[in-house]
Amino acid sequence: MDSVLVTGCDENYLDAAKALFSSTYFNGNWKGDYMLFHTGIPENELKWFMEKGILTKDCGRIIEKNINQYTPAVFLSFFLFKTEMKKWKQIVFLDPDIIVDASIEKLGKVKGMNAVQDPRKGNYMGKHLTETDPKLFAEMEKKFI
């Protein structure tokens, strides 16, 4: 497959991630691969994902504490920049707490890096992080970029 749909979660969002993948498969017409980035989830809790052919990756924790409203699980999206992800031409990352109710086929054809702005602040997570903790952002930048 040339594309992969990814979400990330900890034990608090397992059911949401299942709902996302199910809705993407049944309603979203997604034809690419599926992958779950996770942290702190025992292997027996991942059985549902593996039985459905969803790739799973234990990413560990990048940070141990919340930063503003962001939990450590939110930072799993940084793993999208790891070398191993380059095997796919298109990567679509969706938060686990959404439900797909229509086709998302076109997302697998988007070129370049794109994201939706935070509607509450008109910016993106990286800006929140750089303004809140520039030292942590610099450490993460070295690791992932």
Image: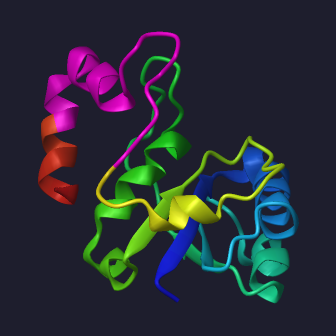
Read off the magenta span. Answer: 114-137
Q: Above or below — where is 57 with respect to 135? A: below
Where 55 sits versus 63, above or below? below
Q: Quadrant of residue 56?
A: bottom right
Residue pictured at 27% horizontal, 23% vertical: 127
Q: Identify the residue at horizontal 84%, vertical 59% (top origin).
A: 23
Q: Is residue 38 visible?
A: no
Examine the rendering and report whether any part of residue 10 can be seen: yes
How many numbered discs, if any? 0
- Residue 55 picture location, percent across and down: 62, 81
Quadrant (top left, top right, bottom left, bottom right) of the C terminus: bottom left
The percent position of residue 63, horizontal first and vertical second, equals 39, 42
Question: In the image, what residue occupies the spot 22% across and 46% down?
Answer: 140
Residue 61 point in image, percent of width and height: 45, 53
Note whether 142 is above or below 122 in the view shown.
Answer: below
**Quadrant location of residue 39?**
bottom right
Which quadrant of the structure image shows residue 64? top left
Which one is nearer the viewer's eye here, 134 or 113?
113
Using the image as rendered, state which of residue 11 and residue 77 is in the foreground: 77
User: Of 22 and 42, which appears nearest the observer?
Assistant: 22
Q: Is residue 131 above or below residue 89?
A: above
Q: Would you say residue 16 sits in the magenta stretch?
A: no
Q: Does residue 129 show up magenta in the picture? A: yes
Instruction: Give percent across and percent down for residue 110.
Output: 42, 59
The residue at 75%/84% (across/down) is: 50
